[in-house]
Image (cartoon, helix red, strand yellow):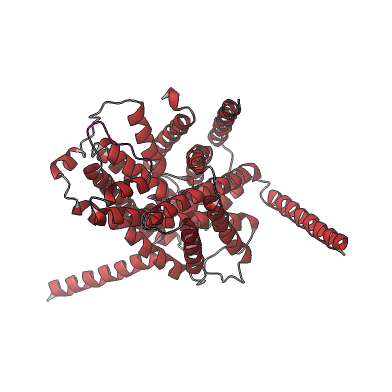
Amino acid sequence: MTSANEKGVGHMEKNMVQEWIGKVKEINHKYSQPRLHMTPLVKASLLALRIYLIILVMILVYKFYLVVR
Amino acid sequence: MEFWASLFYKYRRLIKWLSLYLALAGPGIIVMIADNDAGGITTYAATGAKFGFSFIWFVILLGPIAYVVQEMTVRLGAVTKRGHAEAIFDAFGPFWGWFSLIDLGIVNFLTLVTEFIGMTAALNIFGVPPLVTVISVSALMIAIVMYGRYWTWEKIVLLFCTLNLIYIPAALIVRPDYNQVMGGLMPAFPYGFNGEVFFFLMANIGTTIAPWMIFFQQSSVVDKGMTEKDIPFGKLDTAIGALFTILVAVFCIILTGSLLFKPGGTDIESAADAARAIIGSQPLVGTALAIGLFDAGLLGAICISLASSWAMGEVLGWAHSINNKLSEAPMFYAFYFLSLLGAGIIVLLPGAPLVLITLFVQVIAVTLLPAALVFLIVLLNSEELMGKYKNTLFQNVLGFSIILMIIILSTLYALSVLFPEVF
């Protein structure tokens, strides 16, 4: 009985995960073509943003390393 | 006779205009006053206790800055009829979309925890146990969205916004030295410019523009159904909100500057500490400070949890309007309830790292704020999206300068929280 229940719960969880993955794929597909025209200025802004975020994440990781050490 | 007829006509037009404004007012005032959340009130109280009235001028400068940023969200929401999260997905694609949505979810949840910390600390002054505060606040917040009407929700929240003005009479009761207050209006650094001053100024900037505000106001404008023709009213609403937020901030500084400031400065950890310190000598004022802190936390919590739910709903395709009933938008309301439940549980957990969470919020917000601001100004420059409502050259110069300044200063603030020894 318990095993059947566990199996049911496991199946439900699997379905939920699959549903979410499907949803994410659907959203990714829906927005796959950015509507905004990518001018050089927009591209440069997004690149600057990526670099900023990478540096920030590196600083956060460094701080985490200092705390853990 | 013609004069009286013309006067009557102008009077009727004014009444009509005012009625229209009152019908459309809300998102701007709510977002701006909720900006003075528990963290904001703590920052202002600490600034007053540490430096007296010295930085009133600086706080006043932050009003127009907040207005410039938030005004852009009004135009973007009214023209595109999309919330900020959906607008990012649509304009920049899934990478930036998911980044913003997930980051917003994390930042907002942690900020929600800090709002609960503020509310429980405020009511604890009156002997209310944290468990009772968390349950009552959650029940109240659930009740005000359950009406299924945006209009009702907005008017109830505006009532809480009015309570936020409690700092104005409270500061007047203590009879501050008005000559000294006027002195604080002059831009100056009477205690020099050192790391500590810099930290406080950055903290004040950090509380003025938060990522959730951009997402909240844009979604709120959309949920309210505002269109292009309502933009002037939305701008006025935001300007009035900015005025109120600065008034509250200034009077909060006047309050703690009058009662707690001593030569050399007084250090306080939170607005609740300030209320406890004041309540012994000035029970009425201390009580007002505590009530104001509770209200600030409540307003912040209402707006932040809704900002997240709106953003999730927009992207994941759930029905996501407060006009929807629970049965019509179950996921939207479930997300809202679960956010409240999660934040409340964390605050009640014995030994939860609440101080660490408070500090971490300021750091993690910096990963989202620059991105949200950059997306905002890029979107506002798109002729395709905005048409004749796109930014003018003047708006761009102003917007770019302010956004650049916010990015630099908020990053420095986050770094000063991470590495206090450097500053």
Please identify the residue farthest to the top as the structure is shown: B422
Q: Residue at x 31, y 39 (%)?
A: B47
| The C terminus of chain A - image quarter | top right
Q: Which of A3 and B71 is in front in this view?
A: A3
- On the image, the x and y values in percent for residue B81 come to 52, 58
Camera-side residue: B151 or B388? Answer: B151
> A32 left or right of B62?
right
**Which segment is the magenta one?**
B263-269
Q: Which residue is drawn at 25% across and 47% down?
A: B255
Query: Magenta region, mostly helix, strand or loop?
Result: loop
Left or right: B159 with respect to A26? left
Res. B28 in view = no
Query: Is residue B123 inside the magenta stretch?
Result: no
Residue in front for this viewpoint, B89 or A8: A8
Q: Which residue does the image show at 87% across and 60% down from the upper left?
A: A3
Residue B36 as seen in the image, left or right of residue A5: left
Q: Where is residue B312 in the image (x, y as percent from the top left)?
A: 60, 55
Residue B387 point in image, percent of width and height: 48, 51
B343, above or below A67, in the image: below
